[in-house]
Amino acid sequence: SFRRQRQMCIRDSVGVFHSLSEGKAVKIGDKLKKGDIVCMVEAMKLMNEITMPEDGEITWVACEEGGSVEYGQLLYNYV
């Protein structure tokens, strides 16, 4: 069956992308529920949780640890 590809972009902040701690980092194939924390964005020395907007399976991770992220930038693809 066909599953529509969706994109998760950053909306509320700019800063530095951080994966979750060792063993909890989101990767391709992970099945997540709405509200699950997928990563952190550090902005002005504050860590902001980025959460899954709906249930889905991660198909692509667009950012690397320590990379800069800006408004509208793609973080993950999911189905």
Image (cartoon, rainbow, N blue to C red):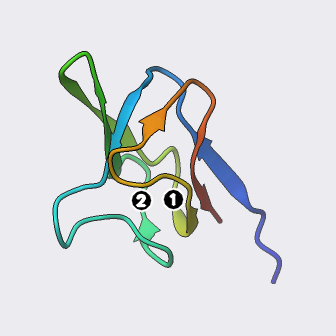
| Residue 78 relative to residue 65: left or right | right
The percent coordinates of residue 57 (x first, y second) are 54, 69
Identity of the residue drawn at 34% across and 53% down: 65
17 in relation to 24, above or below: above
Marks 2/1: CA distance?
4 Å
Where does the C terminus fall, quadrant-wise?
A: bottom right
Most extreme residue toward the top is 44
How many labels, in total? 2
What residue does disc 2 label?
A: 33
Q: Residue 6 lies in what quarter of the image?
A: bottom right
What residue does disc 1 label?
A: 55
Most extreme residue toward the right is 2
Q: Please state which amino acid type lies under the numbered disc 1.
A: Asp
40 in relation to 47, above or below: below
Q: What element carries label 1?
A: loop
Specify few, some or many for label 2: CA neighbours under 10 Å numbering under 14, 14-19, or 20 or more. some
The percent coordinates of residue 67 (x first, y second) are 41, 43
| Residue 58 relative to residue 77: left or right | left
The percent coordinates of residue 58 (x first, y second) are 53, 67
Whichever of labels 2 and 1 marks the residue nearer the N terminus, that label is 2
Identity of the residue drawn at 66% across and 49% down: 7
Most extreme residue toward the bottom is 1
Q: Please state which amino acid type lies under the numbered disc 2.
A: Lys
Where does the N terminus fall, quadrant-wise?
A: bottom right
Identity of the residue drawn at 42% across and 64% down: 32
Specify few, some or many for label 1: CA neighbours under 10 Å numbering under 14, 14-19, or 20 or more. some
In front here: 14 or 9?
Answer: 14
Q: Is mark 2 on a helix, strand or loop?
A: loop
In front here: 5 or 44?
Answer: 44
| Residue 7 relative to residue 40: left or right | right
Is the Cβ of the residue at disc 2 closer than 8 Å to that at disc 1? yes
